[in-house]
Image (tube, grey):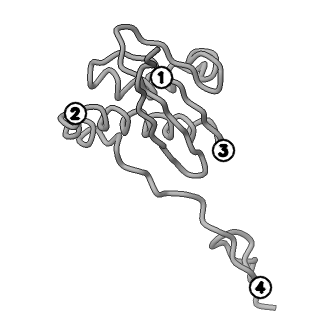
């Protein structure tokens, strides 16, 4: 009994981390944390962002994602990053298109840490002359 080989990659954004398992196939099925794409990300823009690497490459397959941490938008971008990495691992000729679209870049922007003596990362307490 031979099981289908899958490709496992990791996508990250802010504090969100997504483990993506991709198996090439003739029809598309996606589960995220045991739910369908539509039930986990009900907003259409989020669904389109997750599907963007697949539509760009024009491929189908079975995708299983386990995502944790961060907020909804961070999770969406982490899943997109992981899917794009999996597609590249399967076929390296897709790299130029995915890279040009910006799906392979691990966006490093995250919230800056709070410094002592300040209210927030850079906001200082109100100053009074007297």
In this figure, which residue is indicated by the disc labeled 4? 128
Q: CA distance from mark 2 to mark 3?
A: 29 Å
In this figure, which residue is indicated by the disc labeled 1? 63
Tell me which label, 3 or 4, sits earlier in the chain.
3
Tell me which label, 2 or 3, sits earlier in the chain.
3
Q: Which mark's residue is nearer the viewer, 2 or 3?
A: 2
Q: Secondary structure at mark 4?
A: loop
Q: Is residue 128 left or right of residue 16?
A: right
Percent x, y of residue 18: 55, 39
In this figure, which residue is indicated by the disc labeled 3? 69
Q: Which mark's residue is nearer the viewer, 3 or 1?
A: 1
Q: Which mark's residue is nearer the viewer, 3 or 4?
A: 3
Q: Secondary structure at mark 1?
A: strand
Tell me which label, 2 or 4, sits earlier in the chain.
2
Q: Is residue 56 left or right of residue 67?
A: left
Image point (82%, 91%), residue name = 130
Crowd class of label 1 (few under 14; some 14 to 19; many from 20; radius 10 Å): many
């Amino acid at each position: 009994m031979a099981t289908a080989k899958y490709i496992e990659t990791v996508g990250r954004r802010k504090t969100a981390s997504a483990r993506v398992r991709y198996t090439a196939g003739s029809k598309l099925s996606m589960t995220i944390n045991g739910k369908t794409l539509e039930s986990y990300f009900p907003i259409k823009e989020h669904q389109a962002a997750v599907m963007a690497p697949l539509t760009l490459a024009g491929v189908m397959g079975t995708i299983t994602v386990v995502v944790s941490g961060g907020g909804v938008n961070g999770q969406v971008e982490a899943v997109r990053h992981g899917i794009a990495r999996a597609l590249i691992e399967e076929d390296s000729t897709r790299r130029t298109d995915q890279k040009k679209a910006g799906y392979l870049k691990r966006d490093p922007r995250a919230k800056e840490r709070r410094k002592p003596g300040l209210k927030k990362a850079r906001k200082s307490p109100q100053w009074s002359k007297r």
